[in-house]
Image (cartoon, rainbow, N blue to C red):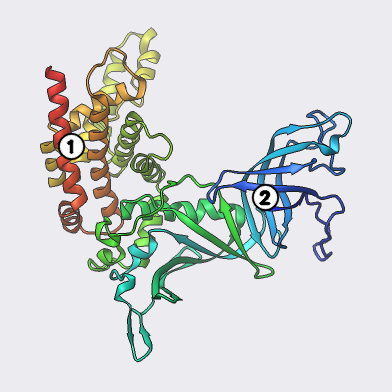
């Protein structure tokens, strides 16, 4: 993206029209669609265009906002930039070069900052069309009768979360060529909410992406983010380097191999409004919000692809899901009575130490907490235990090894860790679906009949046999 770039100096009076500065630096914004991005400039972004060394009298090493205008007249606003490298010539500093790392950018017909107020957001996810659709329709099913094209009707689903209104829209886009017609599914989430650009990712884009990743069994990707400015109603496209899979969605089977589509929820009396309400209520619980984050990291392996990290993140998910059960090892009154009895019978010079040592020690042990979470999922835990006997006991033992390492530990740890992780994934999915409003019987039926679940259970059983064989030999 070639153009001219500068550090904006906005007028103090908001009614004063913004004028382009005289000093603008030529450069190119480079990077993939989902980042990371670098701005390479010929000369510096300083007021006089010089490339300066770092020091007390030099320009700032980082800038919240850098503005630019591309050669085709598009306004581009760069966010969270910092100078990562530079080269300069002592005799002619203006002929040097700078490279600025860019955290994200906006493009459109006007410039913005992360503090710009917006009133509308449209987000497109690659899996959304198949998740929201009632049926699959490929291009060869498009019919022409009397020169009229027949489409399934577009659908729209509405929800209200706090003061925001959300609409999930699904429809079709028609392309005509000499070869005929091709219909492509389109889908978007439109949100009417008053907030700033800096809050878009954390409040809406990231949580909704996690929900779709959970329900689709696929690493959902945000492929388009557009916002509308509150004051001018101009539309601006946002691009942020999101923590998401770089794999493109393969929709050949579409909603047929997803965990729970919109239609599956509707069949059990949970419409989109109730689903989203349940989901955002879940996120208000800090433990459950963190549990979902660890689950998505383990399922997608975007942060760390290693087997031990996949297992540890899945285990952390189960630990945090225990908050739904809670409780203490002993009833609080009984524990307090025991502590008081022990303290009274202790020597006077040790009473303070004994009190300190016994305080906050009524928590359940790790083995018990894991067992109670397994108990939440009924027959599903039996199927998992049948594929890998004593899996609930083994994961407690190997959790410490996976987290801290053990050079003396031998065996097929990779297969073991992946089997543990995949087992825990299904336990977590069961619990999350219940929290989203589906009845237990429906969740059990959805999972047990799912082809992906059956495949993974067979895989876990085969891995267990291989690990046992390697261990015995």
Q: Position of residue 322 (x, y in %)?
A: 29, 39
Assign a secondary structure to mark 2: strand
Q: Residue at x 15, y 31 (%)?
A: 464
* Nearest to the observer: residue 296 or residue 230: 296
Instruction: Kindly identify which residue carries mark 2.
Output: 78
**Residue at far front of view:** 178
Q: Position of residue 455 (x, y in %)?
A: 18, 46
**Where is 37 relative to 397, above or below?**
below
Quadrant holding the C terminus: top left
Q: Residue at x 70, y 42 (%)?
A: 40
Assign a secondary structure to mark 1: helix
Q: Position of residue 445 (x, y in %)?
A: 15, 56
59 vs 331, left or right, is right
* Nearest to the observer: residue 422 or residue 84: 84
Instruction: Kindly identify which residue carries mark 1.
Output: 460
Residue 82, quarter of picture:
top right
How many labels sit on residues? Answer: 2
* Nearest to the observer: residue 180 or residue 23: 180
273 vs 410, left or right, is right
Q: Residue at x 16, y 42 (%)?
A: 457
Q: Would you say the residues marked 1 and 2 are in contact, meaning their CB atoms lie under 8 Å apart?
A: no
404 vs 56, left or right, is left
Q: Residues within 10 Å of mark 1 (few under 14, many from 20)?
A: many
Q: Position of residue 220 (x, y in %)?
A: 40, 53
Q: Is residue 274 visible?
A: no
Q: Is residue 396 visible?
A: yes
**Where is 172 relative to 242, above or below?**
below
């Amino acid at each position: 993206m070639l153009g001219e770039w500068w550090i904006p100096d906005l007028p103090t009076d908001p009614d004063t029209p913004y004028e382009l500065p005289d000093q603008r630096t030529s450069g190119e914004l480079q990077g993939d669609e989902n980042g990371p991005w670098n701005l390479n400039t010929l000369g510096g972004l300083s007021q006089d265009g010089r490339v300066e060394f770092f020091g007390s009298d030099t320009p700032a090493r980082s800038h919240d906002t850098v503005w630019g205008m591309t050669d085709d007249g598009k306004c581009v606003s760069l966010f969270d930039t910092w100078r990562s490298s530079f080269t300069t010539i002592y005799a002619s500093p203006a002929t040097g070069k700078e490279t600025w790392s860019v955290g994200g950018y906006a493009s459109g017909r006007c410039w913005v900052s992360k503090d710009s107020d917006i009133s509308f957001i449209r987000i497109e996810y690659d899996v959304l069309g198949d998740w929201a659709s009632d049926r699959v329709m490929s291009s060869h099913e498009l019919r022409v009768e009397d020169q009229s094209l027949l489409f399934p009707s577009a659908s729209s689903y509405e929800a209200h979360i706090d003061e925001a209104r959300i609409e999930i829209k699904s429809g079709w886009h028609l392309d005509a060529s000499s070869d005929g017609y091709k219909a492509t599914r389109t889908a978007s989430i439109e949100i009417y909410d008053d907030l700033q650009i800096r809050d878009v990712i954390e409040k809406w884009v990231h949580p909704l992406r996690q929900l779709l990743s959970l329900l689709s069994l696929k690493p959902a990707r945000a492929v388009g983010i557009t916002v509308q400015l509150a004051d001018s109603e101009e539309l601006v496209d946002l691009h942020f380097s999101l923590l998401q899979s770089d794999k493109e969605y393969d929709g050949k089977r579409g909603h047929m191999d997803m965990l729970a589509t919109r239609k599956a929820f509707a069949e059990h009396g949970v419409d989109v409004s109730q689903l989203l309400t349940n989901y955002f209520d879940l996120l208000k619980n800090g433990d459950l919000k963190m549990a979902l984050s660890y689950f998505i990291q383990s399922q997608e392996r975007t942060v760390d692809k290693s087997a031990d990290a996949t297992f540890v993140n899945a285990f952390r998910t189960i630990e945090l899901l225990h908050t739904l059960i809670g409780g203490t090892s002993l009833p609080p009154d009984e524990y307090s009575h025991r502590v008081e009895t022990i303290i009274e019978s202790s020597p006077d010079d040790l009473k303070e130490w004994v009190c300190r040592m016994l305080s906050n020690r009524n928590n359940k042990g790790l083995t018990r907490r894991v067992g109670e979470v397994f108990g939440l999922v009924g027959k599903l835990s039996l199927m998992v235990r049948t594929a890998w006997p004593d899996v609930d006991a083994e994961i407690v033992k190997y959790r410490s090894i996976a987290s801290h390492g053990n050079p003396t530990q031998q065996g097929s740890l990779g297969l073991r860790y992946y089997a543990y992780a995949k087992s825990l994934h299904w336990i977590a999915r069961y619990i999350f679906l219940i929290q989203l409003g589906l009845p237990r019987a429906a969740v059990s039926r959805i999972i047990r009949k799912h082809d992906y679940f059956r495949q993974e259970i067979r895989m876990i059983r085969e891995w267990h046999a291989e690990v046992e064989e390697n261990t015995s030999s």
